[in-house]
Amino acid sequence: MFAILGDIEFTVAGGISGLQHSGSADWAEHARIQGKPLLEWMGEGLDEYHLTIELHPLLGDPEERLRALRLAKSQHQPLAFVMGSGEYLGAYVISNVSHTLRRATATGQVKAATVQLSLKEYTGVFTRKALRPGLLDDAVSGTSAATIGSPGLISHVKPSPSALQKVVAHAKTAATVLKTGQNIYHTIKSHNPAMILEQVPRLLSKTAQAIEPLQGLTTAAQWLEGGADLSRLGEQVLVNVMDARASLNPVDLSNILDRFSASEEALDQAVSQMDGANTRLATLAAQILTRRG
């Protein structure tokens, strides 16, 4: 899970492709008879978050998901905004829901769309609901336990894997997803432009599945002794994955071949980088099997 707003979950595999945060400060400007105006700080402005979500049948019913967001906005209630890591960002209201239609049926039903969801900080009285199972308690937010996990410190008590186990698991998941994606690219590259264009949502969906494990690899490796190289690996591979995705958004029939080629090249680089760490990761896996990790 990437984040949760009230009871609405956002996942990378479910289509979330962007998160933008903005914060402001309010300054009053006082004119002076001579010289430039004088600024006086009045207070902090409200924080805002803007989420970009891709809707497609492969990621869930587009119209149903759009209705759920509109319903949440219409209820005019502040909602707890929590990242998947357990970091509580505060109470937020949905200030705007807009969407750009990408594809529709002959009767006007949404088949593919890009949704822009705007959240604005709520500073009134707000009582946060009980923690969801698996989300970290506020008492450990920002500590090593919040990143690594500890059986006694999370809301749902269960054994927590070590940093070494997390690194190996995330790397294995990312490598599998990237290999599968690469096979899809190689399979459809000989198709005509129209057929390749139809496969773009599938490619975006598959590459999206690699983002979370790569982020997990980068974070877990930071807590692993001597894991700086693996943390950099996660960052570098993620850059190539995001480049592969960016090359396919937006695309049309006139540019699909060039965009597809650039996207495929970026994904091939990501796979090559992961393959280059096979020996390193195999050594770590062996440590786990021999109970040294």
Image: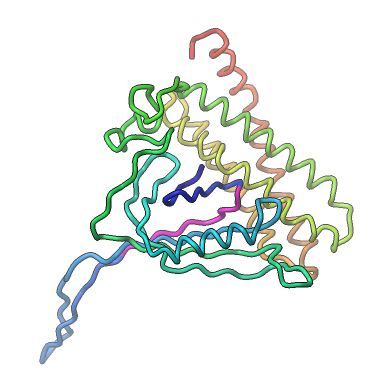
The x, y position of residue 134, in whole percent, is: 43, 33
Viewer-nearest residue: 30 or 152: 152
Rendered position, 26 above or below 127: below
**Quarter holding residue 272:** top right
181 is higher (above) or lower (below) than 283: below
What colour scheme was applied to this rendering of the protein?
rainbow
Quarter where residue 39 is shown: bottom left
Magenta: main secondary structure: strand
* Left or right relative to 116: residue 273: right
**Among the 4 quarters of the image, the one containing residue 77:** bottom left
Task: Report if residue 69 lies within the magenta region.
Answer: no
Extreme left residue here?
Answer: 33
Give the x, y percent position of residue 34.
Answer: 12, 90
Most extreme residue toward the top, as rendered? 290
Residue at point 24%, 60% (across, down) = 124
Q: In terms of depth relative to the viewer, which is nearer, 193 or 263?
A: 193
Left or right: 1 as drawn, with respect to 132: right
| Residue range of the region highlighted in magenta in the rendering | 14-23
Q: Residue at x 63, y 58 (%)?
A: 55
Q: Total number of numbered labels? A: 0
Relative to 165, residue 254 above or below:
below
Q: Position of residue 92 (x, y in %)?
A: 36, 58
- Of 268 and 107, the residue lying toward us: 107
x, y percent for residue 240: 62, 47
